[in-house]
Amino acid sequence: MRATTAPLGARSVAPTLRGAAPFSERSVPDLLPGATALGTLAKTTVTLGAAIAGCAIGAIVPAEETALWMLAGVAFLGGLLSTWSPCGYSSLATLRPWGRWSPAAVMAWLPTLAAHGLGYLLGGLLLGGLLALGAVAVRVPEGASWPGLLLGGLACAYALDQIGLVRLPYPQRKAQVPHDVRFRWPMWRIGLLYGFALGLNFVTYVRTPILYLVVAAALLSGSAASALLLVLALNLGRFLPLFVNAFPLTDRAVQRWLAEREQLSVLAGAAALALVGTALITDTLSG
């Protein structure tokens, strides 16, 4: 899902009713880009710098020693960046402790946190298991150079997409949980089911194309263990932001903090993709 920003100073004007006082114009501060609004030149410069760094890494460090862990690190970052998706926002809000913050409220909320983590683990094992079977079935020949070029090209292409220079597809299922789900089931059950759905990654909104790189890398890894590692690293990054609910922060404060940094999150994803993509390509070509 690409980042969108409403015009600065966006306002809404409601119609007046006969005999009623006219409504005043009201600004919508949650839609303002704020200080993190970035131009194309700034985003391109940062992404280019990351690409140059990736070239240096690829030329100096052999990929067989670092590729898997570098991809796992990018997968973990992709999980964190998924917090800026509609599902990321809603999971933080939906799975908050009940009532006002207190140590007792947090303690009562811990089973929900644990169930949510278990859901992510189960969803990750299912997706990772399927990709592990695919990795064994693909059987990339030892010493083949095309996987590195393919993964590097995919990463670089989506880095350009993230900064708006090209447009690429985002396969996803745009589904959300019902707004009244907190009133339907016990919180631990909601946490478990929500974690499992998000852990599958493809049954809800896709926030960052790092997911597609992770899937491709898992399939081309040639190792079931590597495929599982990449998916679980991604899901760990998706799970950890829920810990913010253990602190005395209002939901509005958390959502506003995320909204004000949305463009920075997109840029971070672009830079990570450019770095790992050029590192893989440089290492493959220099090898």
Image: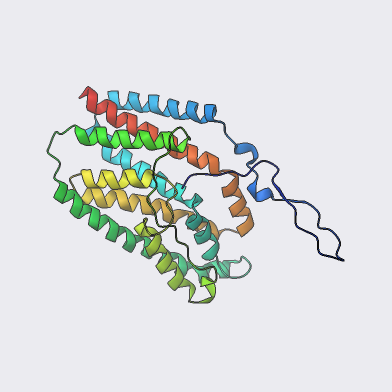
Q: Is 268 situated above or below 50?
A: below
Above or below, 70 relative to 46 = below
Q: Nearer the viewer, residue 77 or 15?
A: 15
Give the total number of marks visible in the rendering: 0
Image-quadrant location for residue 272? top left
Judge whether residue 117 can be spotted in this image: no
Camera-nearest residue between 214 and 19: 19
Identify the residue at image location x=55%, y=67%.
Answer: 97
Camera sees residue 133: yes
Relative to residue 186, is residue 144 drawn left or right?
left
Q: Residue at x 43, y 73 (%)?
A: 189
Residue 261 occupies quadrant: top right
The C terminus sits in image quarter: top left
Q: Could you tell me which residue is drawn at 17 percent across and 45 percent down?
A: 222
Colouring convention used in this rendered image of the protein: rainbow
Residue 170 locus on image (x, y percent): 39, 47
Position of residue 157 relative to residue 24, above or below, is: above
Q: Looking at this view, name the residue that lies furthest to the front.
A: 18
Q: Position of residue 275 (x, y in %)?
A: 37, 32
Give x and y (percent) for residue 106: 54, 66
Q: Is residue 200 left or right of residue 18?
A: left
Percent x, y for residue 80?
44, 48
For image coordinates 56% across by 49% down, the residue present is 258
